[in-house]
């Protein structure tokens, strides 16, 4: 009897390396793909993980995960996160998330505080006219 396949060797196993995503984010994304739920995320990491998962969901066309992450970002928005969140919304075409960011920035106090953050500095690089746009609203 002829063998269709040779003996399986452990060193024949191939691995796939994904360089554009942290292992923790990839594991969470896989968990979501297989269970349609997110694993528990530590309270202090929710925004950061939601941002990373939002990018991954957009890259891999996981619309439900992208929507869940956008919702998390809306719920945890504050002065320290809004500029980065707005930049992500711009880069990944999420109009609903952009609108929530703009509403948050409609308060002069919020806008004034946000302009001092590193996230706003990055936002000005990718959207140089952002201040005029925000003030025009």
Image: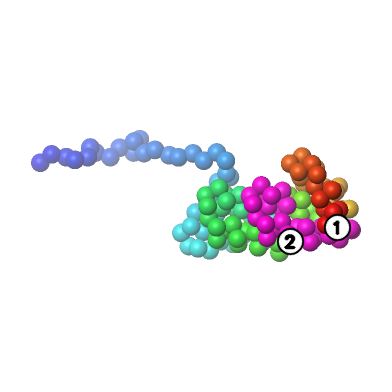
Find the magenta span and give its range.
85-110
Q: Quadrant of the C terminus?
A: bottom right
Check residue 110 in the rendering and tell me which mark sits there, or answer none: 1
Horizontal and vertical percent position of residue 38: 56, 61
The answer to whether residue 65 is left or right of residue 94 is left
Helix, strand or loop under label 2? helix
Horizontal and vertical percent position of residue 85: 71, 53
Mark 1 and mark 2: Cα distance apart in space = 13 Å
Q: Are marks 1 and 2 in contact (CB under 8 Å)?
A: no
- Magenta stretch mostly in which secondary structure? helix
Q: Residues within 10 Å of mark 1 (few under 14, many from 20)?
A: some
The earlier-in-sequence mark between 1 and 2 is 2
Helix, strand or loop under label 1? helix
Q: Is 68 one of the magenta-colored residues? A: no
Residue 9, placed above or below residue 54 = above
Q: Nearer the viewer, mark 1 or mark 2?
A: 2
Residue at the limit of the structure toward the front, as seen here = 136
The answer to whether residue 16 shows anywhere in this view is: yes
Horizontal and vertical percent position of residue 82: 76, 54
Q: Residue at x 28, y 40 (%)?
A: 8
Horizontal and vertical percent position of residue 55: 61, 49
From the viewer's side, name the closer residue of 14 and 136. Answer: 136
Check residue 35 in the rendering and tell me which mark sits there, or answer none: none
Q: Residue at x 36, y 39 (%)?
A: 13
Residue 127, placed above or below residue 51 = above
Residue that carries the numbered disc 2 in the rendered image: 100
């Amino acid at each position: 009897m002829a063998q269709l396949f040779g003996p399986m060797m452990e060193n024949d196993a191939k691995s796939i390396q994904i360089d554009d995503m942290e292992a923790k984010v990839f594991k969470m994304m896989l968990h979501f793909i297989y269970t349609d739920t997110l694993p528990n995320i530590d309270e202090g990491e929710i925004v950061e993980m939601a941002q990373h998962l939002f990018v991954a969901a957009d890259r891999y066309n996981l619309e439900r995960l992208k929507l869940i992450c956008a919702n998390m970002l809306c719920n945890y928005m504050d002065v320290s996160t809004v500029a980065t969140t707005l930049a992500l919304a711009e880069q990944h075409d999420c109009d609903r998330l952009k609108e929530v960011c703009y509403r948050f920035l409609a308060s002069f106090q919020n806008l004034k505080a946000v302009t001092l953050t590193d996230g706003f500095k990055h936002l000005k690089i990718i959207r140089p006219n952002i201040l005029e746009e925000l003030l025009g609203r």
